[in-house]
Amino acid sequence: MRFLLAWTPILFVFGLAFLGRRSAFAIALPGLLYTSFLCFIVFETPARVIILAAFDGVVTTLLLLLAVYAGMLLSSVLSETGSLGRVMAWLGGRVRAL
């Protein structure tokens, strides 16, 4: 029974995303609350562990967002200066040489 309950957060988020047509930001808080409730009540996970896991998820997500936004900024700057075209031409020449 616990194995099946462990799948419910995934089904819950899937239902909100596809059936409820909600964005990722709108799904984040209900998903966190449902999963935290399930861990605390059903799996008897200590509250300290749940809070630290949630904090770790936030820090990891922020670092990934920073990397994505930095890549978008770099791509934009390289496109504006024309450097991206030169890099693509150089890479295209290297691929053709193989």
Image: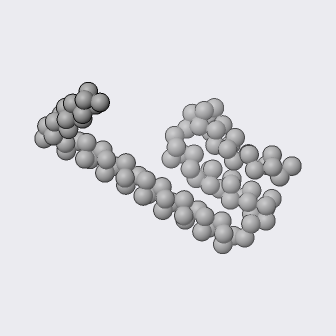
Seen from the viewer's position, the closer of residues 46 and 28 is 46
Asked if residue 63 lies left or right of residue 37, the reply is left
* Image spot of residue 2 (x, y percent): 83, 52
The image quadrant of residue 11 is top right
* Image spot of residue 10 (x, y percent): 67, 44
Farthest residue toward the front? 98
The image quadrant of residue 54 is bottom right
Query: What quarter of the picture does the C terminus occupy?
Result: top left
Farthest residue toward the right? 1
Seen from the viewer's position, the closer of residues 94 and 17 is 94
Asked if residue 72 lies left or right of residue 37, the reply is left
Image: 10 above or below 95: below
Q: How many discs appear?
A: 0
Image: 54 above or below 26: below
Farthest residue toward the top? 96
Q: How is the image coloured?
A: one colour
Asked if residue 31 lies left or right of residue 67, the reply is right
The image quadrant of residue 86 is top left
- Asked if residue 92 can be seen in this view, the reply is no
Q: Residue at x 26, y 47 (%)?
A: 73
* Image spot of residue 67 (x, y percent): 37, 52
Seen from the viewer's position, the closer of residues 41 and 98 is 98
* Image spot of residue 56 (x, y percent): 54, 64
Q: Residue at x 26, y 27 (%)?
A: 96
Image: 51 above or below 14: below
Image: 78 above or below 41: above
- Asked if residue 76 can be seen in this view, the reply is yes
Asked if residue 65 lies left or right of residue 92, the reply is right
Farthest residue toward the left? 81
